[in-house]
Amino acid sequence: MRLLPVLALAAVLIAPLRAGAMRADGTLVVVIDPGHGGDKDGAIGPGGLKEKEVALAIALRLERLLAAAGHQAILTRRDDTGVELADRVALANERGADLFVSIHANSMPTAEARARTHGIETYFLSADATDEAALAVARAENADDARSAGPKAEGALGMILADLARSEAHANSSQLAYALHGSLVERAGGRDRGVRQAPFAVLEGAAMPAVLLEVGYISHGAEAQRLADPVEQAKIAGAVAAGIERFRTEVLQKQARSTLGGKVGAASLAQ
C-alpha cells in the first residue's frame, strides 16, 4: 500500500475533528459560561454587587442575541446554581460546541488598586501566564475548584485525536480572544487592558476555541455601577455577540473553505 493515499485518507478523516467548525448552514453552537454561582460569589464590588450575578445577567442577554442570529446557545447555568469547573468545559465537549465563552468580572485586592484599576481583559489558555498580574487573575478564578478541568482521552488513538483537536482549538482561541476583545473595547467602551494568556482551569481540556472574558473591574466604583446597569449589560452582551460574528466570518468561514478544498484534493490523491 502506498503511503500517500493513506496520508490523504487520514487527512479526510481528521478534518472533521478540527476545532471551531461551523454547521453546514453557517450557524454555531456556543456554550456560554456565567462564572461562579451557588456558594461561589466571585468578586464582590462596592455595595455588595456580586460577580456571579453580573456574569449571569450578561450571559442570559447573550443567549438571546445568539439565538436571534440563528445560533444555538447553551448556558452552563441558568440560575444561581453552583457548577464545578470541570463540568463546564465537559458540557461544551459533550455537546460538540464550536465555541466556549466564560464571562467574569475582575477585582483588585487593595484600596489603592481598586480606586485606579478598571477596564476589559480577555484571556485564552496557556500554561505560562503573560505576566504576574495575569497569573493572579487565573489563581483567583481557579479558586472555585482546585481540580484540573480537562477530561482525559482514553487509548492511544483517543489521545492523538484529542491532541490534534486541542492544538487547533488553542490556535483558534487566540483569534477568538482578539475578535471578542476588540469588539468589547469598541462597543462597550471599557478601557483596553489587552488580550492575555493564563492557566485558567475552566478552559482546560476544551476541544474548541475557548476564552475567558473579564468584562470589567467590579472592584472599581464607577465600573461596578456600569456592570450593574441593565443597559450596559445589554451593551456588553451585544459586543460579545458582534465579536463572535467577526470571528465566524473572518476566521471560521475562511477555514471552512480551506478545509473543503483540502478534502477534495486529498480524496483525489487517494483514488
Image: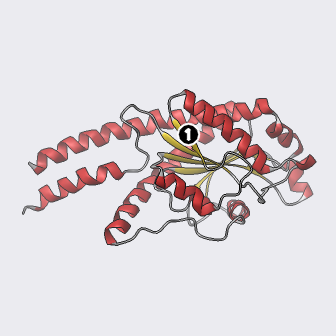
Is residue 130 shown to the viewer in this render? yes
- Between 122 and 233, the one nearer to me in the picture: 233
| Above or below, comparing residue 202 to residue 60 in the picture | below
Residue at x 67%, y 41% (from the top left corner): 59
Q: Position of residue 84 (x, y in %)?
A: 64, 62
Q: Where is residue 207 in the image (x, y as percent from the top left)?
A: 46, 56
Q: Where is residue 221 in the image (x, y as percent from the top left)?
A: 89, 44
Label 1 sits on a secondary structure element that is strand
Is residue 189 shown to the viewer in this render? no
Count up the numbered dots: 1
From the viewer's perspective, is 174 left or right of 212? left
- Between 47 and 187, the one nearer to me in the picture: 47
From the viewer's perspective, is 188 left or right of 12? right
Q: Where is residue 58 in the image (x, y as percent from the top left)?
A: 70, 39
Residue at x 38%, y 31% (from the top left corner): 25
Residue at x 64%, y 36% (from the top left corner): 62
In the rendered image, the quadrant that contains the N terminus is bottom left
Disc 1 designates what residue? 73
Q: How crowded is mark 1: few (under 14 residues within 10 Å), some or many (20 or more)?
A: many
Colour scheme shown: secondary structure
From the viewer's perspective, is 44 left or right of 183? right
From the viewer's perspective, is 68 left or right of 8? right
Residue 36 in which image quadrant: bottom right
The three-letter code of the residue at mark 1 reads Ala
